[in-house]
Image (tube, helix red, strand yellow):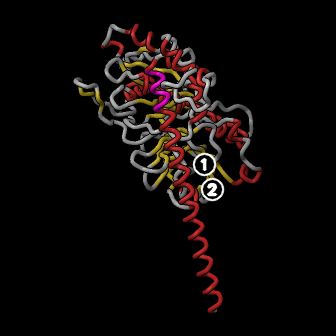
């Protein structure tokens, strides 16, 4: 079994209750450690409470899922209608209901949050993770630090409704810490922490984001120290690490697939491959939240379709001219807005094509069955 599955089981303290009660209490305690919350419990019917077991997806492979639940770690084969839709199929962090005896996956529970991106070079989305509570946006004290990229990640996090923190690693390799604090001082709802990911004491402040029963995700480029940070938080070597090219601070992919890991305090930590491309789609609300100051100014422009370039009465342009608004920030806002509209339109067209094709298949199948019935 892959070490990505939970290796640390909670100690269930047994009291004077009956064996059945002890077993039920132990199962519930284990599920809570895995991130089980009332939000998921309330989705179960009375029959499902009796006939099914909830399990959490810990890792996804081409032909199988690694899951963990009240029985421990097991493998579920990927087949059936549950896995047909690219946008609806289970991903890391999802909760599935398995039939108690056959261990067949029956359905996926509704998600509390979902991270996804446009698949590079494709017309569909790629699921990143589900049911995440908190996010560390990881960058480093070198060429990787990029406000526009941080805003891109922040839009994704805002759309999902998660709590976020920017973590700047490799703080031991730079004395210019103030420049990073200065760069993010206007982002009042986005805390900044500078750490040496190799030093467990340095990352101690981040433990508030991975309390027992909560799931923490690390997002960032390759080589910024996500896997090293994960290992320091976990107190053991869970993920492989590698160096970077010093001339351009570019990293190499050490994490090959997304997986959940356990940490000593009982929280779960998601490690994922570095993403050089994070195409955004269907994150309009997240984008508005990240750039709320610009959106409020844009609402004051004289023209509703103002492009914020040379139009008279443009409140955004006036704020830039008076240095109240950073021109870089406005450029990135425009870029991301165009990208989200373009990708959302592409997804809508792709979904329409898939629905039309499915309808065609059903129609052809129906005609074939009718002819066969008539021949008989």
> At 42% from the left edge and 27% from the top edge, which residue is drawn?
149
Kindly indicate the quadrant of the structure image that contains residue 3: top left
Q: Which quadrant does the C terminus fall into?
A: bottom right
> At 36% from the left edge and 14% from the top edge, which residue is drawn?
171
Q: Residue furthest bottom?
A: 375
Disc 1 element: strand
The reply to whether the magenta stretch includes residue 329 is yes
Q: Please state the extent of the stretch shown in magenta in the rendering.
A: 328-335
Q: Which percent across, then down, holds residue 6?
A: 50, 37
How many marks are shown on the rendered structure?
2
Kindly indicate the quadrant of the structure image that contains residue 358: bottom right
Disc 2 element: strand
Label 1: few (<14), some (14–19) or many (≥20) C-alpha neighbours in 10 Å: many
Kindly indicate the quadrant of the structure image that contains residue 257: top left
Q: Is residue 130 above or below residue 203?
A: below
In terms of secondary structure, what is the magenta stretch mainly?
helix
Q: Can residue 234 be seen in this view?
A: no
Q: Which percent across, then down, holds residue 343?
A: 49, 44
**What residue would you read off at disc 1?**
96
* Camera-nearest residue between 226 and 200: 226
**What residue would you read off at disc 2?**
106
Per the model, the C-alpha gap separating discs 2 and 1 is 7 Å
> At 59% from the left edge and 24% from the top edge, which residue is drawn?
298
The reply to whether the magenta stretch includes residue 245 is no
Q: In this view, does 93 lie above or below 80?
A: above
> At 53% from the left edge and 33% from the top edge, which residue is drawn?
156
Label 2: few (<14), some (14–19) or many (≥20) C-alpha neighbours in 10 Å: some
Q: Which percent across, then down, holds residue 141?
A: 35, 17
Task: Look at the numbered discs 2 and 1 and tell me whether their residues touch, using CB distance below 8 Å.
Answer: yes
Q: Which residue lies furthest to the left in this view?
A: 247
Residue 303, which numbered label? none
């Amino acid at each position: 079994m892959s070490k990505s599955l939970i290796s640390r089981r909670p100690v269930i303290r047994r009291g004077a209750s009956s064996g059945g009660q002890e077993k039920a209490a132990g199962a519930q305690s284990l599920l809570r450690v895995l991130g089980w919350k009332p939000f998921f419990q309330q989705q179960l019917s009375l029959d499902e409470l009796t006939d099914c077991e909830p399990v959490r997806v810990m890792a996804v492979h081409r032909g199988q899922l690694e899951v963990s639940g009240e029985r421990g770690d097991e493998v579920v084969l990927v087949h059936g209608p549950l896995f047909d839709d690219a946008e609806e199929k289970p991903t890391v962090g999802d909760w599935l209901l398995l039939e108690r005896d056959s261990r067949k996956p029956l359905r996926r529970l509704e998600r509390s949050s979902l991270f996804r991106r446009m698949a590079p070079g494709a017309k569909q989305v790629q699921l990143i993770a589900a049911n995440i509570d908190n996010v560390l946006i990881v960058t480093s004290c070198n060429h990787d630090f990029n406000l526009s990229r941080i805003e891109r990640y922040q839009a994704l996090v805002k759309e999902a409704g998660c709590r976020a923190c920017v973590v700047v690693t490799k703080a031991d390799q730079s004395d210019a810490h103030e420049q990073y604090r200065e760069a993010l001082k206007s982002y009042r709802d986005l805390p900044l922490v500078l750490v040496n990911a190799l030093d467990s004491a340095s990352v101690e402040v981040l433990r508030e984001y991975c309390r027992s029963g909560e799931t923490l995700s690390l997002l960032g480029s390759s080589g910024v120290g996500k896997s090293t940070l994960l290992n320091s938080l976990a107190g053991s070597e869970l993920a492989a690490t590698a160096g970077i090219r010093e001339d351009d601070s570019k990293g190499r992919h050490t994490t090959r697939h997304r997986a959940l890991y356990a940490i000593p305090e009982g929280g779960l930590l998601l490690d994922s491959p570095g993403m050089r491309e994070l195409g955004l789609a269907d994150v309009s609300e997240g984008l508005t939240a990240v750039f709320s100051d610009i959106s409020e100014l844009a609402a004051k422009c004289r023209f509703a379709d103002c492009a914020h370039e040379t139009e008279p009465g443009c409140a955004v342009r006036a704020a830039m001219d008076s240095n109240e608004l950073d021109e870089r920030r406005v450029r990135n806002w425009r870029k991301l807005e165009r990208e989200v509209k373009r990708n959302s339109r592409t997804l809508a067209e792709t979904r329409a094509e898939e629905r039309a094709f499915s309808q065609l298949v059903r129609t052809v199948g129906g005609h074939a069955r009718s002819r066969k019935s008539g021949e008989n």
